[in-house]
Image (cartoon, rainbow, N blue to C red):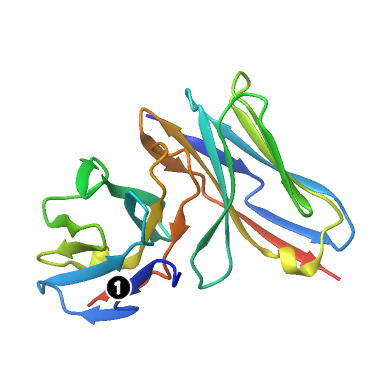
Amino acid sequence: DAGVIQSPRHEVTEMGQEVTLRCKPISGHDYLFWYRQTMMRGLELLIYFNNNVPIDDSGMPEDRFSAKMPNASFSTLKIQPSEPRDSAVYFCASSLGVGLFQETQYFGPGTRLLVL
Amino acid sequence: ELKVEQNPLFLSMQEGKNYTIYCNYSTTSDRLYWYRQDPGKSLESLFVLLSNGAVKQEGRLMASLDTKARLSTLHITAAVHDLSATYFCAGVNNNDMRFGAGTRLTVKP
């Protein structure tokens, strides 16, 4: 398996623009997680899905952030409009569905976002 | 809200030495993760500890969980340069996952 795939790997955009980050989880994994990593705030869990259904989005910082999982092999994290403080590395991870937070999570390479 | 504290935040050690990284958390966390991150890279899951008294070992790393003390440890035995990385712990409370700030480990020859 190719592992968790994220695209793009790097994104530079201007404040106010819409940004869409993409993730393909490992086939057969039932859970998908979106994380954000910054120097100031460290690692944060933003949202997670089980069988394509959003379970908890309490970590999503603002209404400008939204995430979808239209099918088992694809998820998006959208920021609209983007702001400089959204600059971070965004990671997607997936895990098997034995139980939430009971299985090893496999992380993608991350998307490094810079909002100017 | 669950708070997770790691110490030390920076650790420089010589090859061949042993050391322990500590992860304390503020409220109930019945699951504890340890991750490794190399500079500029993604996270690699090292251990998932699911119950009090759980101990897991992989190579030179051993992790344990004491839910009563709200403490997890990551013990490094006979460190080698390849272990240089940042190590994060993360706890879970009511399906809310919180990370520690990370321990940046440097192993010197």
- Quadrant location of the C terminus of chain A in the rendered image: bottom left
Name the amino acid type tagged 1.
Leu
Helix, strand or loop status at disc 1: strand
Q: Is residue A4 above or below residue B28?
A: below
Q: Within the image, what quadrant is residue A38 found in?
A: bottom left
Q: Residue B86: where, in percent of width, then height?
A: 60, 59
Q: Chain of mark 1?
A: A
Q: Which residue corresponds to the image point at 48% horizontal and 43% vertical from the top-left?
A: A103
Kindly give the residue lying farthest to the right in the view shown.
Answer: B16
Would residue B50 be seen by someone viewing this image from the given angle? Answer: yes
- Check disc 1 and report the residue beneath it: A113
Q: Is residue B62 above or below residue B30?
A: below
Which residue is depicted at the point 58% across and 68% down? B38
Task: Give the side of residue B16 with respect to residue B88, left or right.
Answer: right
Which percent across, then down, holds residue A65? 16, 56
Q: In which quadrant of the rendered image does the N terminus of chain A lie?
A: bottom left
Q: Position of residue A26 (x, y in %)?
A: 38, 62
